[in-house]
Amino acid sequence: MENKHSGTGNDNATGTATKEVSFLNRIDLSSPDIHQSVSLLKQACLDCGFFYVINHGISEELMEEVFEQNKKFFELPLSEKMKVLRNEKHRGYTPLFDELLDPDNQVHGDYKEGYYIGVEVPEDDPKAEKPFYGPNVWPSDDILPGWRHTMEKYYLEALEVARAIVRIIALALDLEADFFDKPEILGQPLALLRLLKYPGQISDPSNGVYGAGAHTDYGLITLLSTDDVYGLQICKDKYAQPRVWEFIAPLKGAFIVNLGDMLERWSNCLFKSTLHRVLGNGQERYSIAYFVEPSFDCLVECLPTCKSKKNPPKFPPVIYGDYLGQRYKDTHIDLNVYNKLQS
Ligand code: OGA
Ligand code: NI
């Protein structure tokens, strides 16, 4: 199948330019040469904040199953999907336009549907009193047999991949390999799996229409797997004008990994939380994002290895849950809108 993606071009209305597909370093998790992995990863984090992870240990069968199940869910009638609509704990279905990632440049919300799955916390667990912690919602097993099982399996396996990657990141920041394994960071992670479908709509940046508006991710790292349809673009320098956008090529079986805002804060901007967006090209596109977030109470402040007298911290310390809550509030439709629509 031909992948329609634009080459070099300009988009004058928003003062942006697009370039051909960029090259990303590949981190091989099966490699015994940890020094090489650290060096490749560090280079990627300093340069563009995105890299591929290959040989990550999740089987091809599971990857395929997750994509098949993903597709089955989004093919359900809207009335069925609305039965598992996103709740106040950010679990469940997000319809088209639910999220608006770049309000300054978008005429309406993102042209995508999604489904959030998070860490399973029973309702009567004291932890469930906090935002973002609670039980998941699932489509009925009669309608999508095995769906929950597949997603739970993937959720756990992807978390192990994330743990392996953050060990390499810690080493690249001159920290102990287990730095991010602390209880307040990945001991009780707030990881969120987000299934995504971009319907076959053509984005129109000059008129503010996007699959997903320009944004950075919020947490530690994001593990993205995609089908083979182009769509994801990154902007290496978010402060440059005009902004230059480059397509990231899908790589079968690999994760596209990018750093979130907390790594930029921990590292005092040494590592980048890179701006990215998704353009629809007329083909349906499926992707699965796994946001690996520190725990809700984690205090994120500049690492001792990343500050000096000449280079003082650029950000004040922040409680991750506060940051995440604010970002979600800024970018998601108020749930009352749906309540009104349904009543
Ligand atoms: C995201 C994201 C990219 C994609 O969900 O944060 O950047 O290709 N997704 O779906
Ligand atoms: Ni993103």
Image (cartoon, rainbow, N blue to C red):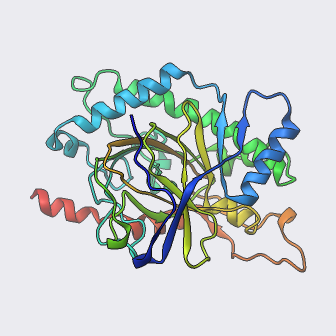
Q: Position of residue 323 (x, y in %)?
A: 54, 67
**175 relative position to 53: left or right:** right
Which quarter of the figure has residue 28? top right
Q: Is residue 195 left or right of residue 256?
A: left
Image height of 130 relative to 34, above or below: below
Q: Residue at x 42, y 46 (%)?
A: 134
Above or below, comparing residue 91 to residue 75 in the picture: below
Residue at the location (76% across, 47% down)? Answer: 41
Q: Residue at x 77, y 65 (%)?
A: 270
Q: Is residue 300 visible?
A: no
Q: Identify the residue shown where x is 69% and y is 66%.
A: 265
Left or right placement of residue 125 versus residue 26 in this view: left
Where does the N terminus fall, quadrant-wise? top left
> Does 97 sit above or below residue 116?
below
- Quadrant of residue 74 in the image? top left
> Where is residue 136 drawn, in percent x and y?
38, 40
Name the residue nearer the viewer: 205 or 175.
Answer: 205
Relative image position of residue 174 (x, y in whole percent): 87, 53
Q: Can residue 235 be seen from the camera position used here? A: yes
How many labels sit on residues? 0
Image quarter where the C terminus lies is: bottom left
| Residue positioned most to the left | 343
**Along the viewing direction, whichever of 306 and 317 lies nearer the viewer:** 306
Drawn side of residue 67 relative to residue 18, left or right: left
Q: Nearer the viewer, residue 77 or 320?
A: 77
- The x and y percentages for residue 332 are 35, 63
